[in-house]
């Protein structure tokens, strides 16, 4: 089992203080890290430890390389790990009574390298939807076409498991519920992606989907009419609908994605004032009190540019500020900012998983930022502790809309 080494990371100043006159050994004859560590500890490094017998007795960077067993009076030594693959070294030191942060630490120089290595090797199965048309002659048609897809991490393999132009979806128990945008269906799959039921929808532009397990209801958002529809979770029968409206301007909010949490429905939209078709993009996330059909939505997060994917993660409301490439919460500081049009997000263990679509609004983006705009579609795995990310490209796909993780 990998060892949690978060307590082993010290700064060079902290390492020098911890040494306190003891002999220093570098543990790992690494061509990448030894030459960086020696100048940080002038006249303090006594030798290099490595398990490879071919190095033993030889001089490297002016220091003799020896096996760990030849170190005398280990309790009077301090060890700086200079090998990127260090789990076994940590275990060996701890088995010999060494205390992390007191008797040894990892070289600060490869902390970022280790964080990236962990991201690149993280194992997960990511289910995502694409709303691409399955017709390459259409503006949003793509080579692969739309559907539901599984991305395997870390191999990067992508498999389409259902064909269609799907927007938001959600897993509930033994079923997957999804909105088919082009054919105008609400679809119920089993976990093997066999279609159990299809419900024909009465108009185009259905986009968002959320599930209320307690009341056994499905909510759908229509981006064209700014209406929220209710359906029965078991048989997909229509139950009711209500308008998303904040004033008298009409159906110009462009509601898109939904999230149900603790008795309220949360909705993202392009314009709270209703000026979307007038070029006003005061987007955000609002809470809808489902028990009060005449009550206006209450905006919780505003000032967003074409946002998507409101979600509750670790008990906190988060949303993607899609055009700016930001993952934000109610705090003034974004969680992160990426370089493309982001849509679709979840969290798997410590990592954020964030989708990126080919940017159809690149002209608008270029006029508002000096940063390069990344056009590829794909999925980021992002670690907010190290502020580092790895990007999996999804070749042949234009749009990614919704993301979740599956059990392996």
Image (tube, rainbow, N blue to C red):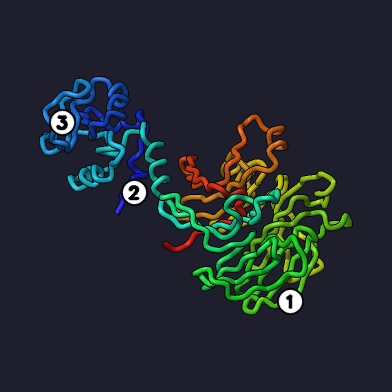
Q: Mark 2: which secondary structure? A: loop
- Position in image of residue 366 (x %, y %): 68, 33
Q: Earlier in the sequence, mark 2 or mark 1?
A: 2
**Which comes sooner in the sequence, label 3 or label 1?**
3
Q: CA distance from mark 2 to mark 1?
A: 50 Å
Name which quarter of the figure residue 221 lies in: bottom right
Determine the CA span between mark 3 and mark 2.
29 Å
Give coordinates of residue 11: x percent, y percent: 37, 32
Q: Give residue 389's position: percent from left, percent from top.
A: 49, 42
Q: Position of residue 27 (x, y in %)?
A: 23, 34
Q: Are marks 2 and 1 in contact (CB under 8 Å)?
A: no
Mark 3 or mark 2: which comes first in sequence?
2
20 or 366, which lies in front?
A: 366
- Label for residue 111? none
Left-right relation of 162 to 300: left
Report which residue position mark 2 lands on. Answer: 4
Name the residue: 61% across, 48% down: 398
Tell me if residue 206 can be seen: yes
- Return the mark for residue 55: 3
User: Is residue 329 visible in the rendered structure shown here?
Assistant: no
400 and 342: which is toward the camera: 400
Q: Residue at x 25, y 44 (%)?
A: 90
Residue 178 in the image: above or below residue 1: below
Looking at the image, is mark 2 or mark 1 nearer the viewer?
1
Q: Are marks 3 and 2 in contact (CB under 8 Å)?
A: no
The local crowd at label 2, few if under 14, some if 14 to 19, many if 20 or more residues have their Cα within 10 Å, is few
Distance, label 3 to label 1, CA atoms, is 75 Å
Residue identifier under label 1: 239
Residue at 80 percent of width and 61 percent of height: 225
Q: Residues within 10 Å of mark 3 (few under 14, many from 20)?
A: some
Task: Decide: is 376 above or below 301.
Answer: above
Q: Considering the numbered disc 3 on the image, is that residue within a helix, a strand or a loop?
A: helix
């Amino acid at each position: 089992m990998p060892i949690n080494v978060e307590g082993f990371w010290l700064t060079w100043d902290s390492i020098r203080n911890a040494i306190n006159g003891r002999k220093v050994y570098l543990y790992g004859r690494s061509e990448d890290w030894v030459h960086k560590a020696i100048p940080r500890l002038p006249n303090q490094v006594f030798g290099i430890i490595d398990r490879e017998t071919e190095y033993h007795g030889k001089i490297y960077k002016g220091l003799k390389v020896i096996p760990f067993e030849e170190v005398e009076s280990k309790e009077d030594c301090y060890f700086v790990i200079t090998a990127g693959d260090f789990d076994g070294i940590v275990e060996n030191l701890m088995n010999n009574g060494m205390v992390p942060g007191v008797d040894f630490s990892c070289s600060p120089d490869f902390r970022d390298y280790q964080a990236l290595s962990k991201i690149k090797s993280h194992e997960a199965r990511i289910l995502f939807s694409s709303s691409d048309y399955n017709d390459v002659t259409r503006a949003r048609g793509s080579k692969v076409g739309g559907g539901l897809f599984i991305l395997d991490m870390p191999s990067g393999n992508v498999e389409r498991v259902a064909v269609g132009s799907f927007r938001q979806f959600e897993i509930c128990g033994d079923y997957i519920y999804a909105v088919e945008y082009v054919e105008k269906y609400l679809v119920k799959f089993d976990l093997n992606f066999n279609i159990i039921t299809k419900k024909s929808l009465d108009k185009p532009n259905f986009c968002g989907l959320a599930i209320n397990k307690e009341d056994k209801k499905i909510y759908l958002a229509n981006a064209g009419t700014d209406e929220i529809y209710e359906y029965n979770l078991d048989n997909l029968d229509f139950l009711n609908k209500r308008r998303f409206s904040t004033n008298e301007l009409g159906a110009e909010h462009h509601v898109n994605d939904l999230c149900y949490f603790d008795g309220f429905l949360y909705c993202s939209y392009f314009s709270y004032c209703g000026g979307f078709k007038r070029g006003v993009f005061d987007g955000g996330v609002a809470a809808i009190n489902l028990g009060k059909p005449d009550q206006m939505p209450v905006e919780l997060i505003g000032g967003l540019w074409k946002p998507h994917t409101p979600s509750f993660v670790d008990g906190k409301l988060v949303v993607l500020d899609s055009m700016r490439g930001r993952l934000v919460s109610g705090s003034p500081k974004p969680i992160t900012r990426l370089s493309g049009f982001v849509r679709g997000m979840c969290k798997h263990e410590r990592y954020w998983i964030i989708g990126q679509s080919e940017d159809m609004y690149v002209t608008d983006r270029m006029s508002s930022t000096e940063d390069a705009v990344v056009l590829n579609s794909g999925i980021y795995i992002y670690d907010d502790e190290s502020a580092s990310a790895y990007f999996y490209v999804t070749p042949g796909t234009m749009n990614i809309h919704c993301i979740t993780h599956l059990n392996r």
